Image (tube, rainbow, N blue to C red):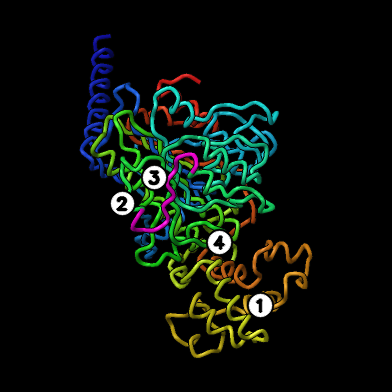
């Protein structure tokens, strides 16, 4: 009996020693992939500064694709360069279905994140009955704690995801109604993209920008004026000076030197929202979703990396206020059915091939649109040098194909046929294009040439897509700082709201 007791005691001592060593390793910051900022252990008090980052259309694959792209693909040395938020000490896993579909949209999923309920796809801030109007976390914090609130998005500011944090409408398409509720919200800082349909669907309503001014908002749309904003600026809507793609900020891949980024708008948000009672800042990288719809992996990855840069701004802030700051990073749903691995590449990936893509599909569409106007009867042979310049792909038996550095970029006969077919369809007016099940699967409603180019380049890199729409894949939830521990585990996306209620110690 004595031997058994002694043995058990020794085992206990060894286990405690191992646990202590593990804790010491974590606290020392030498654990693999540990985050390089002060670890803000929760003290049980409510966070004063809350950052909510949403990668629209971002699931685990989008995150890891960016990590693979930034990593090392050298044989024998394969490794990822993990993103800052993937190294957060707390990680969770959230399901995303809404009340109508396992492949939901941004309106319903953002409503789940902001308000803790399930609703129909397309519905913002209302229950499944399209009548019940729950208060969003932003509205509750404003009312109960007098916190300042900021909403930032790289897409239009009255798009579904940002709208879920300040509006309640039966249809996400009611852009003008959403803009009116934006003006009535009293929130302190809006920034990023422009307003969709600012004078209404029929262009017969009072301009939403003028309504915002009437409600006491300053509208700033130059880099100089935006960078001058501070906590004495009052209620502000900062519109990106450079817009693309129906009023959104440009894709990160298309940014020119000096263009404002999501990180810039988050940093400026901190300046505007700075006050003694704290703030809640929601920032969305919305074009992760848009590039996922278009199956454009390079643009997708760059917008994930843009989100990482914005998160770094929050992390730098958290260093100053480690016991008062909470950072949450998640997605609302997955878009495109993105996959690392493709049938024709087997177990190989070569994400470095994506380096040859110089612009987003939108920028390429704009480039081709200008060329079509100048030369309406362009031939494939005339366009091929432009394709090589912007996507790196080369014709078989060409001079470029003979170079060893271009070996992975040589078009196969099948790829060349697809590209020629896509070009032929692209040169037609939209009304003349073939409408069939096959062309829907091939092009998904996007320009036949640009989407064929991204498909070919993606597949050569080892990336596949299953859809031009959203999928039912769960999303990761990363948390850091005060109260972060409650975000660990597996749960539903509505629980993100309830966990925020819990850590902020407010009432629903």
Q: Which is nearer the N-term, disc 1 or disc 4?
A: 4
Work out whether residue 224 or residue 301 is closer to the camera in this orientation and state it. Answer: 224
Disc 3 target residue: 86
The answer to which image quadrant residue 79 occupies is bottom left
- Let me know if residue 82 appears in the view: no
Q: Considering the numbered disc 1 on the image, is that residue within a helix, a strand or a loop?
A: helix
| Residue 81 falls left or right of residue 164 | left
Q: Which is nearer the N-term, disc 4 or disc 3?
A: 3
Q: Real-space Cα distance between discs 4 and 2?
A: 27 Å
What is the number of the mark on residue 495?
none
Q: Which is nearer the N-term, disc 3 or disc 2?
A: 3
Disc 4 target residue: 245
Q: Is residue 504 magenta?
A: no
Disc 2 target residue: 228
Q: Real-space Cα distance between discs 1 and 4?
A: 22 Å
User: Which label lies toward us, 2 or 1?
Assistant: 2
Work out whether residue 67 or residue 319 is closer to the camera in this orientation and state it. Answer: 319
8 to 445, vertically: above or below: above
Task: Point out the stretch of residues depicted in magenta.
Answer: 214-225
Work out whether residue 413 or residue 449 is closer to the camera in this orientation and state it. Answer: 449
């Amino acid at each position: 009996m004595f031997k058994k007791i002694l043995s058990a005691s020794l085992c206990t001592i060894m286990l405690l020693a191992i646990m202590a060593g593990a804790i010491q390793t974590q606290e020392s910051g030498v654990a693999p992939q540990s985050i390089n900022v002060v670890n803000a252990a929760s003290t049980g008090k409510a966070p004063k500064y809350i950052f909510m980052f949403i990668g629209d259309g971002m699931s685990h694959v989008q995150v890891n694709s960016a990590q693979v792209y930034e990593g090392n693909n050298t044989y024998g040395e394969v490794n990822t360069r993990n993103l800052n938020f993937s190294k957060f000490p707390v990680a969770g896993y959230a399901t995303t279905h809404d009340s109508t579909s396992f492949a939901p949209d941004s309106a319903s999923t953002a409503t789940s994140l902001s308000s803790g309920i399930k609703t129909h796809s397309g519905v913002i801030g209302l229950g499944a009955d399209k009548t019940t109007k729950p208060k969003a976390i932003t509205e509750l914090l404003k009312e109960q704690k007098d916190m300042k609130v900021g909403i930032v998005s790289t897409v239009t500011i009255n798009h579904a995801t940002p709208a879920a944090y300040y509006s309640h409408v039966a249809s996400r398409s009611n852009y003008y109604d959403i803009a009116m509720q934006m003006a009535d919200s009293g929130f302190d800082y809006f920034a990023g993209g422009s307003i969709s349909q600012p004078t209404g669907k029929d262009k017969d309503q009072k301009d939403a920008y003028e309504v915002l001014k009437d409600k006491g908002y300053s509208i700033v749309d130059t880099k100089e004026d935006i960078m001058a904003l501070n906590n004495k600026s009052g209620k502000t809507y900062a519109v990106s000076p450079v817009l693309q793609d129906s009023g959104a900020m440009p894709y990160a891949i298309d940014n020119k030197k000096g263009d404002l980024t999501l990180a810039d708008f988050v940093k400026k948000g901190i300046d505007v929202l700075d006050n003694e009672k704290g703030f809640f800042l929601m920032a969305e990288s919305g074009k992760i979703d848009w590039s996922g719809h278009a199956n454009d992996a390079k643009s997708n990855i760059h917008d994930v990396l843009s989100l990482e840069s914005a998160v770094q701004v929050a992390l730098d802030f958290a260093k100053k206020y480690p016991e008062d700051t909470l950072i949450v990073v998640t997605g609302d749903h997955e878009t495109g059915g993105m996959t690392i691995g493709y049938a024709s590449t087997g177990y190989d990936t070569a994400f470095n091939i994506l380096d040859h893509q110089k612009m987003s599909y939108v920028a390429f569409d704009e480039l081709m649109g200008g060329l079509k106007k100048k030369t309406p009867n362009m031939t494939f042979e005339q366009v091929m040098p432009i394709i090589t310049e912007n996507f790196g792909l080369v014709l078989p038996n060409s001079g470029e194909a003979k170079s060893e550095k271009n070996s992975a970029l040589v078009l196969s006969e099948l790829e060349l046929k697809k590209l020629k077919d896509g070009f032929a369809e692209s040169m037609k007016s939209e009304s003349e294009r073939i409408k069939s099940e096959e062309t829907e699967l091939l092009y998904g409603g996007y320009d036949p040439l640009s989407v064929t180019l991204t498909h070919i380049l993606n597949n050569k890199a080892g990336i596949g897509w299953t859809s031009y729409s959203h999928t039912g894949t769960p999303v990761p939830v990363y948390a850091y700082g005060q109260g972060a521990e409650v975000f660990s585990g597996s749960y539903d996306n509505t629980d993100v709201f309830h966990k925020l209620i819990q850590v902020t110690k407010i009432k629903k």
